[in-house]
């Protein structure tokens, strides 16, 4: 039975999307993303918010602005579309996450703080999975902390004092060459 369930979910994962953070409120698409990423990329992102970024990257066309869209950073979603979703997390705040995984593909994942201007991570990872979404496991064996976990926000001084300076990024790279990201804008 376990083999059947594993085989079923492996087949099912080929058909559906994959994963996205649903808690806390992540960045969403909006008109700034459409302007930066172009219609074809935007339509792929809109049609499957769970899908790998590579699906959208395959649709880049002349209206894609690589200097503005940054598909492999916060999924190309723009801060300008999310100014009403900026969270406030003081040093030491414990932030609860929920990741909705629709298909498992073995890889590695982490949650990190990112500097939005330089598009780099900073500080230590807030959470790390050396093996994430192991597709050899069936649903009964999936680790709960892959979908529900908490991270403690460190003291970042004044680095994240202004909206648009920092985000928390959940990042998953599956070994089948698929990348998934969600960003949560925050201030401290």
Image: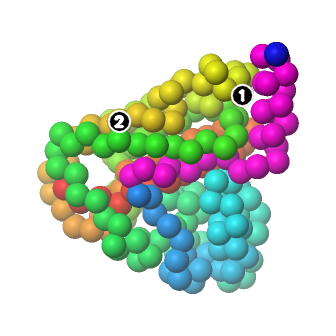
Left or right placement of residue 161 versus residue 4 in this view:
left
In the image, residue 66 sits, relative to residue 9, either above or below, namely below
Of the pair 160 and 30, the residue shown nearer to us: 30
Q: Position of residue 67 (x, y in %)?
A: 54, 73
Residue drawn at (76%, 63%) of the image: 58
The magenta region covers 2-24
Residue drawn at (35%, 48%) of the image: 113
Q: Position of residue 76 (x, y in %)?
A: 55, 66
| Local SS, label 2 | strand
Q: Would you identify the image quadrant in which residue 184 lies? A: bottom left
The verdict on residue 13 being magenta is yes
| Quarter the C terminus occupies | bottom left
Q: Which mark is residue 176?
A: none
Number of disc labels: 2
User: How would you rate the neighbour count of disc 2 (Cα within 10 Å): few for under 14, some for 14-19, many for 20 or more?
Assistant: some
Q: Would you identify the image quadrant in which residue 2 lies? A: top right
Q: Is residue 36 visible?
A: no
How far apart are the two marked residues, 1 and 2, measured between alpha carbons?
Answer: 23 Å
Left or right placement of residue 66 versus residue 121 in this view:
right
The verdict on residue 56 being magenta is no
Residue drawn at (39%, 52%) of the image: 24
User: How would you rate the neighbour count of disc 1 (Cα within 10 Å): few for under 14, some for 14-19, many for 20 or more?
Assistant: some
Q: Main secondary structure of the magenta part?
A: helix
Residue drawn at (73%, 76%) of the image: 40
Q: Which mark is residue 135?
A: 1
In the image, residue 45 sits, relative to residue 134, either above or below, namely below
Q: Position of residue 152 (x, y in %)?
A: 27, 37
| Quarter the N terminus occupies | top right
Q: Is residue 31 visible?
A: yes
Q: Which mark is residue 150?
A: 2
In the image, residue 153 sits, relative to residue 6, either above or below, namely below
């Amino acid at each position: 039975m376990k083999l059947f369930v594993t085989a079923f979910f492996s087949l099912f994962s080929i058909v559906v999307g994959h994963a996205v953070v649903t808690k806390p409120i992540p960045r969403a698409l909006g008109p700034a993303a459409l302007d930066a990423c172009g219609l074809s990329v935007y339509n792929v992102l809109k049609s499957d918010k769970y899908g790998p970024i590579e699906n959208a990257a395959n649709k880049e066309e002349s209206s894609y602005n690589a200097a503005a869209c940054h598909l492999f950073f916060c999924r190309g979603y723009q801060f300008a579309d999310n100014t009403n979703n900026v969270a406030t997390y003081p040093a030491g705040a414990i932030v609860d996450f929920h990741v909705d995984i629709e298909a498992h593909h073995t890889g590695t994942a982490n949650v990190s703080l990112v500097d939005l201007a330089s598009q780099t991570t900073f500080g230590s990872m807030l959470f790390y999975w050396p093996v994430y979404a192991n597709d050899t496991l069936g649903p009964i064996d999936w680790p709960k902390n892959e979908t529900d976990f908490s991270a403690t926000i460190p003291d970042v001084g004044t680095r994240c004092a202004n909206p648009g300076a920092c985000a928390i990024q959940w990042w998953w790279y599956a070994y089948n060459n698929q990348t998934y990201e969600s960003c949560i804008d925050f201030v401290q």
